[in-house]
Image (tube, rainbow, N blue to C red):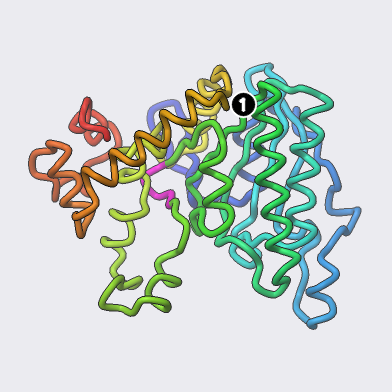
Amino acid sequence: MSQATIGNTTSRSYYEDSARGRLLGLLDPGSFVEILPPAERVVSPHLRQLGTPAAFDDGIVVGSGRLEGRRVLVAAQEGGFMGGAVGEVHGAKLTGLLERALDERPDGVLLLAESGGVRLHEANAGLIAVSEVMRAVLAVRAAGIPVIVLDGGTFGCFGGMGIVARLCDAVAMSEEGRLGLSGPEVIETTMGVEEFDSRDRALVWRTVGGKHRYLLGEAATLVEDDVATFRAAALALLDLTPDLSLAALEAEHAALGGRLERFGDCRDALDIWARLGVEEPERLPILDTAEFLDTVRDRRA
């Protein structure tokens, strides 16, 4: 974990931290209570049968805590284990947490997403698990409890978890975060390197990274790569009121249709940024977060 001292404040990298480290830095000190902690040893039954190493928490930490005194349920995916992939137990822990929210009615549910999607080793069990998570997210939102995603980890948020993230009330991202349906390697494998070169890191970041997602309106907030800034963003987003009304859904569909009409012929994020009216769009990747936000003010899709 990287730490740097700025003045009297210690900066702690969200990108380089572990799932447990992020939770401990995010929540009020001493408030986190883990559900199914490591001693319970609830691990995937499928990996054992395949002779594949398992993790004591199946790659996800769930529990409750407080954020500036406000009561929240939290889940943090650990990218260090199979890229945060969702298997049967992993998904069941997340679904169970969301269903618990319906009983306990916390001030919000925080999902610290870091996942490549469904765990291929568990095939249909993983797919079913993700579908159950999606349904549970919508049930929690329908109950008026906001579900907030924090995306700034090493492995990004892709596949089924990318869909889950977009089902939530808001996504807070850092520039280092990534969000999408198919990951860069999947696109390259399926469509060829001519379509998308996953080794071109600049291309990857400007296509699925936090700055682009913020400009498209898919990320509500763009923050520095720092646990404290993610904490502040999560706290602010807790005041959101979930809206699953027909009018809200129709407005979202209209916005997506308008975006397709406006940018459908663009071949690169740079083309979209230019069409948004950003001067010198090629400079956006090199700007720090504060400069970027100042530059793109009133330019979001």
Judge from the rendering whether residue 97 lies leftward or rightward of residue 193; answer left or right: right
Prevailing secondary structure of the magenta residues: loop
Give the mark count.
Answer: 1
Q: Is residue 229 above or below residue 287?
A: above
Q: Position of residue 141 (x, y in %)?
A: 64, 29
Quadrant of res 136: top right
Residue at the bottom extreme of this rendering: 51
Residue 54 percent location from the top left of the image: 77, 69
Q: Position of residue 207 (x, y in %)?
A: 31, 55
Tell me which corner region of the image, top left, top right, bottom left or bottom right, holds residue 192: bottom left
Q: Which residues are magenta?
A: 174-178
- The quadrant holding residue 250 is top left
- Residue displayed at 54% across by 44% down: 165
State yes or no: residue 125 in magenta. no
Q: Residues within 10 Å of mark 1 (few under 14, many from 20)?
A: many
| Residue found at the far right of this picture | 40
Q: In screen coordinates, is 108 left or right of 215?
A: right
**x and y percentages locating residue 121 in the rendered image:** 70, 75
- Residue beneath the point at 47% across and 36% down: 172
Q: Nearer the viewer, residue 69 or 133?
A: 133
What residue is shown with label 1? 146
Quadrant in which the C terminus appears: top left
Task: Work out which residue is located at the far left of the displayed protein and give it.
Answer: 279
Q: Amino acid at mark 1?
A: Pro
7 relative position to 147: left or right: left
Question: In percent of the image, x 44 and y 40: which residue is there?
Answer: 173
Toward the viewer: 229 or 193? 193
96, above or below 49, in the image: above
Secondary element type, mark 1: loop
